[in-house]
Structure formats: structure tokens, C-alpha cells
Amino acid sequence: MSRPAILVTGGSGQLGFELARLLPAHGEVTALDRAKLDLGDADAIRDTLRALRPALIVNAAAYTAVDRAESERDAAFAVNAAAVGVLAAEAKTLGALLVHFSTDYVFDGEKPAPYTEDDPPRPLGVYGASKLAGERAIAESGCRHLVFRTSWVYSPRGRNFLRAILAAAREGRELRVVDDQRGAPTPAHAIAQAVARALADARLADKSGLYHLSMAGATTWHGFAAAILEAAGLKAPIAAIRSEDYPAQARRPKNSLLDNAKLRRAFGIALPDWREGLAAVMPAIH
């Protein structure tokens, strides 16, 4: 009996890489990076899906240059919204399940408590607006889907906050890190593990929808940086600064905390504290 085909986009990214390692338990995985599937090319998306005819489409690709998106609106929307709409339409035609990843940046960060899936989105910038448009394209398509909003994603590979802090500390640079934005740093491998577990749920067909998926607990970027240095055994000067003192084109939400209760109710999945996630990642850092 043949195993179901699975397509993972963004296969060389920090999340796509982890998913491609775990999902072979669920079927035959084809993981494509941007060189093999450009999500800016709608025809290429359609041709690839119609050739592979996957039962599961996992979209781990995204335009994630938050600041550059402010001057590259069309590029951000092409990948984060238009391409997602094409994936969703093809998933609907194929009867496939679409798994997609969104972001805390769909919110303005003004709510004092963690955000639930029912809170109204109010993105502050182009990146968040483009990701929200992608969410809505999926909902409007009518395809079976799992959309996971996550936040502060990092891993031992790729470009991310963890690696940037370690590189700066090892070069002896003074660190100036924002201390008025709250969130829960979430390792890519923890997201991938949670997704794999959700896909194994016996009642998955009844659980299509939008879910928040992040680690438990809370810290600031400054607190995360300090924890990284401690875990790595590094000492470096680290100054706490305000968001206004950090040069950035795009505004970030002050509160990026996500309420994961819906995920826990639906799938019995509850990720541990962010500090445990960091401890699990550090041995893989070189």
C-alpha cells in the first residue's frame, strides 16, 4: 500500500527543516526550498501540486524580512498572501489538508493578557498584514486546514535572534537589547513536534481551524538574550533599551504572548516553559 504524499515548502528554512525530519512518519515527504519552488510564481505552485498530488501540504515558507517588508509590500504579499491563496485553492481541489504558519504580528500588542484566536487582529506593519491576508485566504478557500500562529521562532540554524546574540557576544560587542516587548521564545523543533503530534490525532478531520502554538511562560528580548548568554557560558555587556531606541523600520507588538488553551483542548498539546526549550536547543549550537 502506497504511503500518502506530503509536500513541505520552505524545506531549507529553520521550521521547514525540522518538519521535513519528522513528517516521514506520516508519509512520503517532498521538501522543496525556494530554488525548487518559488512561491512568487503561482503557476509553479499549481504545476508542482498537480504533479505531486499531496494529501498533506505543509507551508513552512514565508517572507519574513519584517523591516524590509515596509518597502517591499508587493513581495511580502506575493509570498505571504497570494501564494497561500493558491496553495489553499489547490488543497481544496485535491482534498488535501493544508498546514500553514502565521504569526503574533497579526496583533498590535496593546492587550495586556495573552492573545486568543478570537481576539481581533490589528497588525502594525506590512509583514503582519500580509500574514493576516494569508490566514484569511485559507479560511475563505474552504479547504481543510490547520493554521498555527506562533512567535519568536528560533533554532540552531538559519538567521534568528539566538544565533545573532551568540555571534555578537563572541565578537565582544556590547549588546543593546529591547526590554519592553514580551513574548515566549519558541524553538522550531518544538513547533514541528507539536504539529506532528496534531497530525497523528485520530479525530483530526474534525479539528480544522486556527490555533495558537508557542512555548509557555514569558520574557522580554533582553531577558531572552541574558538567558542565552548564561546557557552558553558567555559574558558580555548587555544593556536594556526601549523599542524607540532600537532602529527599525517596522513597529513590533509590545505583547506577543499567545494563549494556547485552544490547542490544549483540541489536541492535548501544551508546550513547556520557554527556558526548557532553550535548554534543549543549546547542545546543538556550534
Image (cartoon, grey):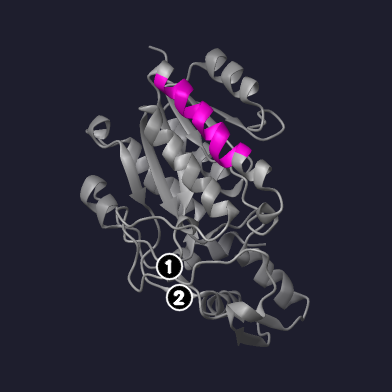
Residue 21 in picture, x, y percent from top left? 52, 39
Query: In the rendered view, would you say 148 is above or below 274?
Result: above
At numbered mark 1, what does the secondary structure look like: helix, strand or loop?
Answer: helix
Residue 51 in picture, x, y percent from top left? 56, 13
Label placed on residue 219: 2
| Residue occupying image coordinates x 44% and y 70% | 255
Of labels 2 and 1, earlier in sequence is 2
| Residue occupying image coordinates x 24% and y 50% | 268
Report the magenta stretch's main SS: helix
110 lies left or right of 180: left
Magenta stretch bounds: 78-92
Q: Is 84 contained in the magenta span?
A: yes
Residue 188 in picture, x, y percent from top left? 51, 53
Label placed on residue 12: none
Tell me the quarter of the picture where residue 74 sits.
top right
Q: Are marks 2 and 1 in contact (CB under 8 Å)?
A: yes
| Residue occupying image coordinates x 53% and y 77% | 227
Q: Amino acid at mark 1?
A: Trp
Tell me the quarter of the picture where residue 165 sits.
bottom right
139 lies left or right of 186: left
Q: Amino acid at mark 2?
A: Thr
Total numbered labels:
2
Q: Residues within 10 Å of mark 2 (few under 14, many from 20)?
A: some
Q: Which residue is mark 1?
A: 274
